[in-house]
Image (cartoon, helix red, strand yellow):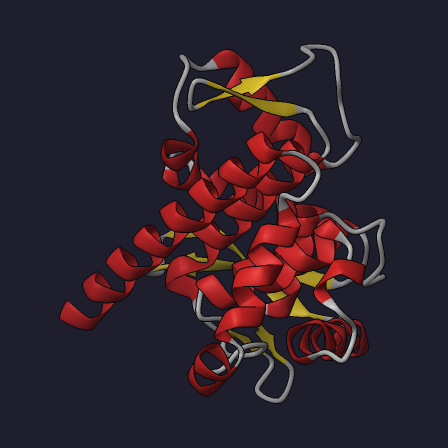
Amino acid sequence: MPDGSTSLPARLYLLAWDTTRLRLTGETQLAHLVRAGALTELAQRGLLSDVDGIATPADLDARTRDLALDGLLELVEESRPRPWKTWVTLHAGVTLDAVRAQLAADGLLRAGRKRVLGLFPSLEYELEGVQVVETLQRRARQVLVGPVPVTEVSDRDAALVALAAAAELRTVVTAADRKRHKERIQALTDRSGAAAPALKRVVHEVRTAMVTAVTAASTMGAGT
């Protein structure tokens, strides 16, 4: 399923799985990463446009038939106008929950119930599609290191790797990779918004906001 039919936020979530330990990595920033992916895909599709720095629905009747993407569209439509950076973090868990529910429905995750503190019911997800994730991670690595020129990488694949690198998702991009391939990562970020100058600005703003959110989450995690 790691193909063009899978949404960008869903692919980013799958990339975060460590298939050796069968556990998620970077959970503190995962909701922000997934939300950034959803914003980017909606902008790439032309369903969210930039109006003076505000994320604005381009067509109130447009839908993607993807649970997470359509849920975010409805949230933006029903809320007061807000800049892109605000949407990276605001109610980001809603998009993450929708991505998990969709992947469970597709058979890539298995949902089970547990109780937090022995009292509150909660859903816990386990990875079912190990081979799917490994294939997706392998293809993402190929985008990161080449040899395919950045100009020949699709905007969605470019966004996938650029956002994974910004989130410091070590299942795809290690700290050494970020230094070694710094220029290519920057080129992939630009490629993500290549369709239009306004889109490029949106992609960079979403990426910057996500880096800020990830840094804040990491700092809080280190202090606890």
Image point (20%, 72%), residue name:
222
Residue 192, position as x, y percentages in the image: 64, 49
Residue 88, position as x, y percentages in the image: 43, 40
Q: Nearer the viewer, residue 66 or 192?
A: 192
Question: Is 78 located above or below residue 211 in the figure?
Answer: above
Total marks shown come to 0
Q: Nearer the viewer, residue 187 or 171?
A: 187
**Which of the 4 quarters of the picture holds residue 164?**
bottom right
Q: Quadrant of the C terminus?
A: bottom left
Relative to 159, 56 lies left or right: left
Residue 5, position as x, y percentages in the image: 85, 49
Image point (59%, 77%), residue name:
172
- On the question of residue 112 being in view, the answer is no
**Which of the 4 quarters of the picture holds residue 72?**
top right
Image point (68%, 37%), residue name:
44
Relative to 7, 177 lies left or right: left
Q: Nearer the viewer, residue 16 or 206?
A: 206
Relative to 79, 8 lies left or right: right
Image point (51%, 46%), residue name:
36
Residue 130, position as x, y percentages in the image: 75, 77
Q: In the image as oriented, which residue stretches furthest toward the left?
A: 223
Question: Is 81 located above or below residue 63 in the figure?
Answer: above
- On the question of residue 80 being in view, the answer is yes
**Which of the 4 quarters of the picture holds residue 21?**
bottom right
Q: Quadrant of the N terminus?
A: bottom right
